[in-house]
Image (cartoon, rainbow, N blue to C red):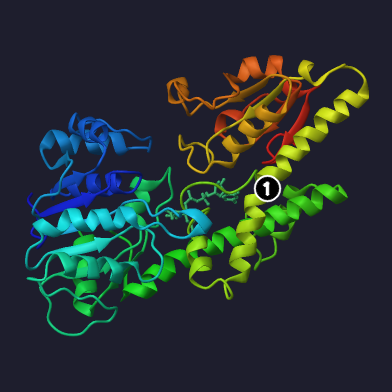
Amino acid sequence: MISKNKFQSLNVIGLGYIGLPTAAVFASRKIRVCGVDINKETVNTINRGEIHIVEPDLDIAVHSTVKEGFLKASLTPESSDAFIIAVPTPFKDKKQPDLSCVEAAVSNIAPVLKKGDLIILESTSPVGTTEHMAKGLAEFRSDLRIPTLNRSEGDFDVFIAHCPERVLPGRVMRELVENARIIGGMTKKCAEMARELYKIFVNGDCLLTDVRTAEMAKLTENAFRDVNIAFSNELSLISDKIGINVWELINLANRHPRVNILQPGCGVGGHCIAVDPWFLVSASPELARITRVAREVNDSKPEWVVAKISKEVSKMLEGGALCSAEEITIACFGLTFKPDIDDLRESPALEITKRVAAEHAGKVLAVEPHIGEDCFLGSDDLNFFLSNITEALEQADILVMLVDHKEFKSIDKYLLSGKKIIDTKGIWK
Ligand code: SAJ
């Protein structure tokens, strides 16, 4: 059945972890979607009905929507009823936001815009980015009346909104549909138009607000999680020093009806939690004090893990069973930025493994069941050996648990006996 919605066609700019699933879900609701990406290989892969990232159920959605003709990929945008921008917003030197991908997307869509179009920024952005984007569009298209200020009033030719994505990698296809959605409009009408678009597939509540509040809400959510994880990482350092099992400690504390501490680990990675809080800090350095310290605590955890491994090596040598560090093999379990995904972006586990391999005189193995060896082919800075679970358990003297993938949780405990274990996730305790 063809949708009766005002929106029959859509461009999604950026076909990454958010853009591609979003494009596929709209296309599965019979909207004609043109996904735009700067990477030719990505475009070709999608046009073959295949995907370039790992996300449960995404392959099925892309395959069927491409086959039915509702989804296609292209290097350039085309005229449509709505545009969703889902490009990266990383930070550059000194933790300052890098908006160059948003700016490039704006200059790409500007020529094809027409009266009545809706433009949505989905990328997580510092407060003020949607207005910056609108001003950019207004410069390119002085023939269109474009709202450029938060809470603008009056009649305009195009509608602009910020609707941050909030889905969790690994559960994207489900969360896209089920999660509540924050919709910030440059005007009230802009927010209402954006709600009409998202209601095509969103079953959760659509919560309308202005663009600045929507931008700030997304940063707040990720900074809140970062601060909570930083607290758990701080507890893990204190507990280690005084000989307490931090996971037992947190489990007990969390039995209080109003306490919910997250889990410590080897650090915080990914392209969101490890990045977005800096947008708050860079906007108000003198005010965002807890946010900054939390970032620093989480960012310093990998260093602590590396030092702990090095201490374990020294202890083994002092024990006298081995003469030199070269005889000691270390196996690091997990390289991705969190469990059960294939994403290495900002991964503290990868950083730790590389650093250990650079500093340790003996062999360093890495076990990562979610990444194929070809991913590392041609990489000049690969200074460790890729291994599998059995080989690593046989060869290594020190086992370092970095990422609690389900494959590692099910390792028989007797296979770990006799090994020195550094468990940053508390699964082999
Ligand atoms: N981590 C811990 N301890 C925990 C939970 C996570 O150390 O208890 C670590 C993970 O190992 C990982 C990092 O934090 O290295 C981030 O993982 P995550 O699962 O907390 O978050 P992301 O980056 O995958 O997704 C987050 C989510 N935000 C919130 O939960 C507030 C998601 O909903 C957002 O859509 C996403 O950021 C985003 O795109 O901004």
Image position, residue 197 (x, y; %): 19, 62
Packing grade of label 1 (10 A; few <14, some 14-19, many >=20) is many
Whether residue 88 is visible, yes or no, is yes
Secondary structure type for disc 1: helix
* Residue 297 appears left or right of 68: right
**Residue 152 falls in image quadrant:** bottom left
Image position, residue 111 (x, y; %): 10, 57
In the rendered view, tell whether residue 287 sits above or below residue 39: below
* Residue 5 appears left or right of 375: left
In the rendered view, tell whether residue 361 sits above or below residue 304: above
Residue wearing tag 1: 301
Image position, residue 116 (x, y; %): 9, 68
* Residue 252 appears left or right of 352: right
* Image quadrant occupied by the C terminus: top right
Outermost residue, bottom side? 153
Residue at the image position 49 percent from the left and 54 percent from the top: 93
Q: Amino acid at mark 1?
A: Lys
